[in-house]
Image (cartoon, rainbow, N blue to C red):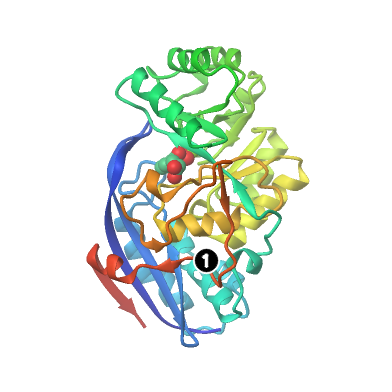
Amino acid sequence: MKLERIALRQIRMPLVHFFETSFSRTYERDIILVEAQGDGVSGWGEVTAGENPFYNEEWTGSAWLILRDYVAPRVLGRELRTAEDVYPLTAHIRGHNMARGGLETAVWDLAARLDGMPLWKKIGGGSRHEIPCGVSIGIQDSVEQLLEKIAEELAAGYQRIKMKIKPGWDVDVVRQVRERFPAIKLMADANSAYTLADTAHLQKLDDFYLMMIEQPLSHDDIIDHAELQARLKTPICLDECIRSAHHAEQAVKLRACGIINIKLGRVAGFGEARHVHDVAQAAGIPVWCGGMLEAGVGRAHNVALATLPNFVLPGDVSASKRYWKRDIIQPPVETTPRGTIEVRDEPGFGYALDHDYIRSITVREETIG
Ligand code: OSB
Ligand code: MG
């Protein structure tokens, strides 16, 4: 397999409802789609960077430049034995995993299509034909609004609720959610809003038998999480901190977490995602698939990833309609009344691209090679 051309497209899509985390509120996404062309076929990837460098150091603007000037030139025209070759070819670039992952996942999709097989099979998945789904619910304008949203998602069948927390929207809000919904699978995600100085405050969350607390401390500090985990009953789930399988090994060694959230972009694609998965599995740590408010391409890639065996917990991958009035794939990603997404058997990522719609929302476009 050899890439002849890489096309970058930036699309702009308004969210159906704003999404607020401890670091910012998002109304509209700016997403880069990566089309990798080789041997007469196209594979598609999606860059999961946000619009600003607040979740990690990347953003749409940086990912565009890194892809164009550093990632694409290192992969174009090279003979690739497998899609796994993309990761080492771009490993000289420090950081910028989401930009790297945009192309890496496109090459996996291309490889699957060239073999006429579904992406989930190509990556070695297929442990389940339906993936269990949870939802991530952002910080709302009022607790009433949050309770209403949770009730809606439970009625739709979702298996677990993740609520975003930050200082000023944490213990009291979680208490009210628990009072209203005593038996649901509930968890909280802080996106690095706290420090070890907040340990006593975070310990109050132990009263609410949460499944886990996701990334309470600094985005790049595994050691502090180990210290906090020793003082919490609730398992910590690491998100931002785990950018590679090596980080997963370090987190295991330090007992910094009981659960890991795997995101394709954060670890630069399927190759490293599988390694993180394997490290966690060997350590007896369950994983689940995180989300980055993806459009259809990234969403479909997440579904494929979540068919690997150790993705045993409900993830953040949910129906397209929770995010978009119209998604860029056909059909959109839908859930069953059981709160699952059925895995599709079509070649590649398993959905058709809505090229007309993509064209109509493209704000810039560039072809390399
Ligand atoms: O931390 O998991 C996160 C969205 C943007 C950035 C970070 C995160 C999230 C989510 C939303 O929680 C997951 C989704 O619904 O796609
Ligand atoms: Mg998170």
At a point 67% along the width and 51% down the height, the residue shown is 277
> Which secondary structure lies at badge 1?
loop
> Where residue 160 sits in the image (x, y, percent)?
56, 33
> Where residue 340 sits in the image (x, y, percent)?
57, 46
Q: Which is nearer the eye, 118 or 195? A: 118
> On the rendered structure, is 319 left or right of 52?
right
Residue under pointer 1: 349
Classify the position of the C terminus by image quarter.
bottom left
Which residue extends farthest bottom? 39
At a point 50% along the width and 51% down the height, the residue shown is 266
Q: Which is nearer the eye, 78 or 337? A: 337
Q: In the figure, 270 relative to 133: above or below? A: below
Residue 113: quarter of image: bottom right
Q: Which is nearer the eye, 98 or 347? A: 347
Classify the position of the N terminus by image quarter.
bottom right
> On the rendered structure, is 124 left or right of 305?
right
Density class for disc 1 (Cα within 10 Å; few <14, some 14-19, many ≥20) is many
At a point 51% along the width and 67% down the height, the residue shown is 104
> Where residue 362 sits in the image (x, y, percent)?
25, 65
Q: Which is nearer the eye, 337 or 70? A: 337
Residue 169: quarter of image: top left
> Where residue 301 sits in the image (x, y, percent)?
52, 59
Residue 96 shows in the view: no
Q: In the figure, 324 relative to 102: above or below? A: above
Three-letter amino acid code at disc 1? Phe
Q: In the figure, 35 relative to 17: above or below? A: below
